[in-house]
Amino acid sequence: MATPDDVDRIMAQWRRERPELDLAAMETFGRLGRLFAHLGRAVDETFTRFGLQRGEYDVLAALRRSGAPYVLTPSALSDVLMLSRAGMTNRLDRLEAAGLIERRANHEDRRSMLIALTPQGVALADEVTTIHVANESTLLSDLTPDERHHLDAIARKLLARFE
């Protein structure tokens, strides 16, 4: 049997106070929520080392993985990142001030602009992504490859409801 954790203690309290409730889903959500908080902090440490916030890295990564010439419209970026246009503007302003992206005129549609990675932005995106991927692998290193596969399959199944 696994070593009891904080969620076990919380569930024991609820079972004592509300024994009629089926707490199985709460128990799962409790662990997922706590895990997400811990993993989020561990992932964010990589970005912080480079003076980035997670959302800023997300913009750089979306542009980088779009392929050369690493250019997207703000609307396409917003859609890919599931972010409001206002939230996107704030991120773009910070990245532009840091010299990592530039706004360009869109010669195909004068009503819009294009967002492009600068050479400095490409280099930083590549460097951070290499370290980020290694960090994520380390964070999952307690799982066997088979366990990682099953976890991914379960997450995919749950995510299908929303996407």
Image (tube, rainbow, N blue to C red):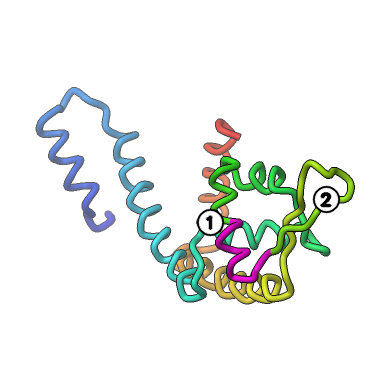
Residue holding disc 2: 106
Residue most toward the right?
A: 108
> Is residue 118 covered in magenta?
no
Dot 2 lies on which element? loop
Q: Which residues are magenta?
A: 92-101
**Residue 139: image x %, image y %?**
45, 67
In the image: residue 106, left or right of residue 11: right
Q: Nearer the viewer, mark 2 or mark 1?
A: 2
Which SS type dominates the magenta stretch? Answer: helix
Determine the residue positioned at 41% across, 60% down. 39
Q: Which mark is residue 145?
A: none
- Tell me the crowding category of disc 1: few under 14, some 14 to 19, or many 20 or more residues within 10 angstroms, Cα based: some
- Give the position of the N terminus as an image quadrant: bottom left
Residue holding disc 1: 55
**Residue 33: image x %, image y %?**
35, 47
Viewer-nearest residue: 105 or 56:
105
Q: Which quadrant of the view contains residue 11?
A: top left
Q: Amino acid at mark 2?
A: Asn
Residue most toward the left?
A: 17
Determine the residue positioned at 64% across, 44% down. 78
Q: Amino acid at mark 1?
A: Gly
- Give the position of the C terminus as an image quadrant: top right
**Residue 147: image x %, image y %?**
50, 56
**Residue 3: image x %, image y %?**
24, 58
Q: Which quadrant of the view contains residue 122?
A: bottom right
Dot 1 lies on which element? helix
Q: CA distance from mark 2 to mark 1?
A: 24 Å
Determine the residue positioned at 70% across, 43% down. 75
Viewer-nearest residue: 87 or 138:
87
